[in-house]
Amino acid sequence: MKKLGMLLLISIVLSGCGGADQKKMGQEYKFSKTNVKDENRIGNNMNYGDFGYMRHMSGDKVKSGNGVPYLNRQKLADMISDMVLQLPDIKDVGTLVTDEEVLIGYKTTNKDRNAAADQVKMTAFSVVPRYFHVYVSDEKGMIDKIEQYQSLNNDTEQIEGIMDRLIQQMKKAPQGKKWNYGENENGEMNGETNNMRSEMEGK
């Protein structure tokens, strides 16, 4: 009888410890919640973090308005400028992003202008959609010149000709290495021009 009582006592003690351990384990392995500042950004469901995920399966009904994702050109230009400025020997940079081009004016202390141009260009190519073309120039005054075009848009009269003239000026400076056998240094297909792209997209 005494042994039975001792076994019962030990069982109760172990049971209590087990409950405490399980509770502690639950606290340690619980998903961390975002702070109050982030709550408004992701909604009231606090089980989600900063990742973005969406799954679509064959046969799913496509929601209206799911066309080409909106591209924030201002933020893209800001990001490209910031990334280019991290490159060695780049001291100043200005970036203009249109609907299909990235124009970058920069100042560099690198004596190998072609190498610097290639680094700047490839930095932009690494973050923009593949159909974009990138033009760079380290010519004096080019940053200020590009800045003057920031108020233009696709509705500006003769915008294609205006942009093409600026691009031709920029291409007088080194543009870096050729992209591949079918495209030039700026990602243009052989024989393609800014006006040709606009005409093709209009058809």
Image: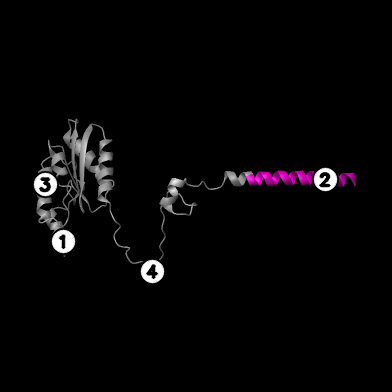
Q: Choose the circle earlier in sequence order: 1 or 4.
A: 4
Region in magenta:
1-23
Image height of 140 relative to 127, above or below: above
Residue found farthest to the right: 1
Q: Which residue shows up at 24% across the image and 43% down it?
A: 122
For the residue labelled by badge 2, is the local secondary structure a helix, a strand or a loop? helix
Image height of 180 relative to 56, above or below: above
* Res. 201 image quadrant: bottom left
Return the x and y of residue 49 as percentages of the image width and height. 45, 49
Q: Amino acid at mark 3?
A: Leu
Residue 61 is marked as 4
Return the x and y of residue 71 as percentages of the image width and height. 28, 53
Q: Amino acid at mark 4?
A: Lys
The residue carrying pointer 3 sits among few (fewer than 14), some (14 to 19) or many (20 or more) residues within 10 Å by Cα, namely: some
Q: Choose the circle earlier in sequence order: 2 or 3.
A: 2
Q: Choose the circle earlier in sequence order: 3 or 4.
A: 4
Return the x and y of residue 64 as percentages of the image width and height. 33, 67
Which residue lies under the disc numbered 2? 7
Answer whether labels 1 and 4 touch (C-beta < 8 Å): no
Q: CA distance from mark 1 to mark 3?
A: 20 Å
For the residue labelled by badge 4, is the local secondary structure a helix, a strand or a loop? loop
Which residue lies under the disc numbered 3? 166
Residue 113 is marked as none
Q: Amino acid at mark 1?
A: Met
| Circle nearer the viewer, 1 or 3 | 3
* Res. 192 image quadrant: bottom left
Which residue lies under the disc numbered 1? 200
| Circle nearer the viewer, 1 or 4 | 4
Q: CA distance from mark 3 to mark 4?
A: 44 Å
Q: Is residue 192 visible?
A: no
